[in-house]
Amino acid sequence: MKRTIVAIGTVLVLAVPASSGAANPDARWLTYPTCSATATTLTCTGRAVVANPRPVYGLGELQAAIIGSLRFTCPDPVFDLFWPIVGDLRYQWAASTTFHNGQTFTMSVARSQLYPATVTAQAACLDSYTQVDPTWYDVSVVVGWGFGSATPITALEAPFGTISPTS
């Protein structure tokens, strides 16, 4: 019997306030982001403008970031786990870059270093997790402040969902 478990971390990843500019109604994509994947790397690029892109006290500079999850399997007991593409659940993004208004941004994240690494994830699986497939799940590109904090602000989000690698 095979069970599927969705990690609470995935909920945290999706908890980044999603909007198409609700935090900043004058934010817009100049070039809607695109993402491409190989079996080992996810790369996203885009271009946006955010009115008044000043730092937010306690949250820092404006950033562009990738959020999403990977699918792992545990052989004992057998279950699947969708885990955020982060090494630590305190951070809700996998890769980020400094955002410059109107300029193109590009960021990448490598799969090789991303494994469920919390005590909770390790306690759920008696053996070690293995990656099930090369697909990237729940992928979004976001622009905002404070990714990695408890109270991030999202000015723009481009949801992609599932991205399968190209050869």
Image (cartoon, rainbow, N blue to C red):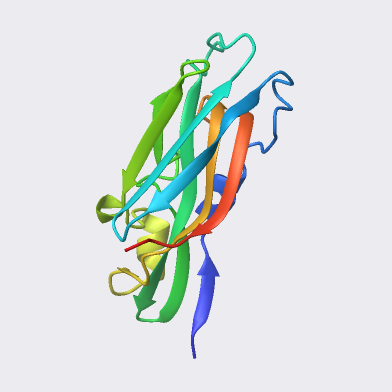
> Residue at horizontal 51%, vertical 27%?
47
Q: Is residue 91 above or below residue 40?
A: above
Closer to us: 155 or 74: 155
> Residue at horizontal 66%, vertical 36%?
17
Closer to us: 18 or 157: 157
Q: Is residue 103 above or below residue 160?
A: above
For the view shown, which residue lies furthest in the bottom direction?
1
Instruction: Give percent across and percent down for residue 131.
Output: 33, 68
Q: Is residue 8 visible?
A: no
Tell me the quarter of the picture where residue 167 sits. Answer: bottom left
Tell me the quarter of the picture where residue 122 sits. Answer: bottom left
> Residue at horizontal 37%, vertical 70%?
133
Instruction: Give percent across and percent down for residue 128.
Output: 28, 70
Q: Is residue 42 visible?
A: yes
For the view shown, which residue lies furthest in the left direction?
112
Closer to us: 42 or 93: 42
Q: How many circles with numbers are drawn on the protein?
A: 0
> Would residue 57 appear left or right of 43 to someone viewing this image?
right
Closer to us: 110 or 72: 110
Q: Is residue 114 above or below residue 128?
A: above
Instruction: Give percent across and percent down for residue 159.
Output: 60, 46
> Would residue 121 appear left or right of 27 to someone viewing this image?
left
Instruction: Give percent across and percent down for residue 65.
Output: 47, 34
> Would residue 83 appear left or right of 132 to someone viewing this image?
right
> Would residue 106 appear left or right of 101 to someone viewing this image?
left
